[in-house]
Every structure is written in structure tokens, then in C-alpha cells.
Amino acid sequence: MEGSEKRRFIRHLLVSPLEFKEADEQPEKTETVNVSEGGLMFLSKRNVLEGKLIDIQMPLYDKVFHIKAKVVHSQADETGLYRVGVSFANFADAFKVKLIEQIYLIEEYRVLRSLQTGKEMSLQEASKEWISRYSDRFEKLYW
């Protein structure tokens, strides 16, 4: 790897709501910036210390996914917010986030196909098309 690049996984842009909590702090509502197979990045109003274990909650429709993660870095950006990078505590948590990402991508696909065809596509129809087109890539990542 060149320079100070430490990433092992490709990052994918994903803006998704989340709430995180350190053991001794109040929960903060924010959103993701990106995700990868190994972790995710989110914005925070406060600096979160490297090495801290945090609890993350990611809502999706009527479900809330609970994820454990370890803070890898936290840096202030030009807006005054902190970009907090975390690694997932285990494979199950990484898999949960990957499923959330896929569902968001299917929803984007549904909207795009609805615009292209001029006919509203259901989430179920979009899911079937998405799976037939892209499930091989998903399977290669995890099985």
C-alpha cells in the first residue's frame, strides 16, 4: 500500500441514519458516510477516542440493527464535525451492515427503474431483478 493508506476493503458511499453510543455517553443521532466489508465511517459532533468500543443502531424500515464496533480513527473535518471510522467487532455485525447496504441499493434501483419505465416498480419486483443481476457479486463476498 502506498503512503499512509491503511484500508483493506473498498469503501462504498452510503448515507444511512444511525445512532451511536459510548458506554458512558448519551446517544448521538447521525448518519453514515460510507461502508466497507470491514467497517464504516460516520459523522459526529464530538471526538470519539481511538480504541473505544461503541454500540451502533441502524434503523431500516421497522427494524433496528444493533452493531458493535471499535473506533479506528476520529478526525475533525472542515465543517467542525468529526469523521469517525470504525471496524466491526465480528463477522455477524459486518454482515448486518452489508444487508442494510444492499436494501438501500435495491431501493435506489427501484426508484431508477420506475423512472426509466414510467411505471411504479414495487420493492419486491426490484428485489427480484436486483438479486438476479447482482447476487453473484454478493455471494462471492461472503460465502
Image (spheres, rainbow, N blue to C red):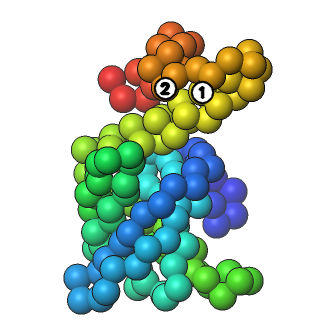
Q: How many marks?
A: 2
Residue drawn at x 36%, y 72% as measured from the top left: 20
Of residues 33 and 91, the one nearer the viewer is 33
Residue type at mark 1: give it: Arg
| Residue where numbered disc 1 is placed | 110
Of residues 73 and 41, the one nearer the viewer is 41
Residue 134 in sight from this viewpoint: no
**Crowding at label 1, few (<14), some or many (≥20) Cα neighbours within 10 Å?**
many
Residue 138 in sight from this viewpoint: yes
Q: Secondary structure at mark 2?
A: helix
Question: Are discs 1 and 2 less than 8 Å apart at CB?
Answer: yes
Q: Secondary structure at mark 1?
A: helix
- Examine the image and state in which quarter residue 82 appears: bottom right
| Residue where numbered disc 2 is placed | 123
Q: Position of residue 26 (x, y in %)?
A: 31, 86
Residue drawn at x 74%, y 15% as measured from the top left: 117
**Crowding at label 2, few (<14), some or many (≥20) Cα neighbours within 10 Å?**
some
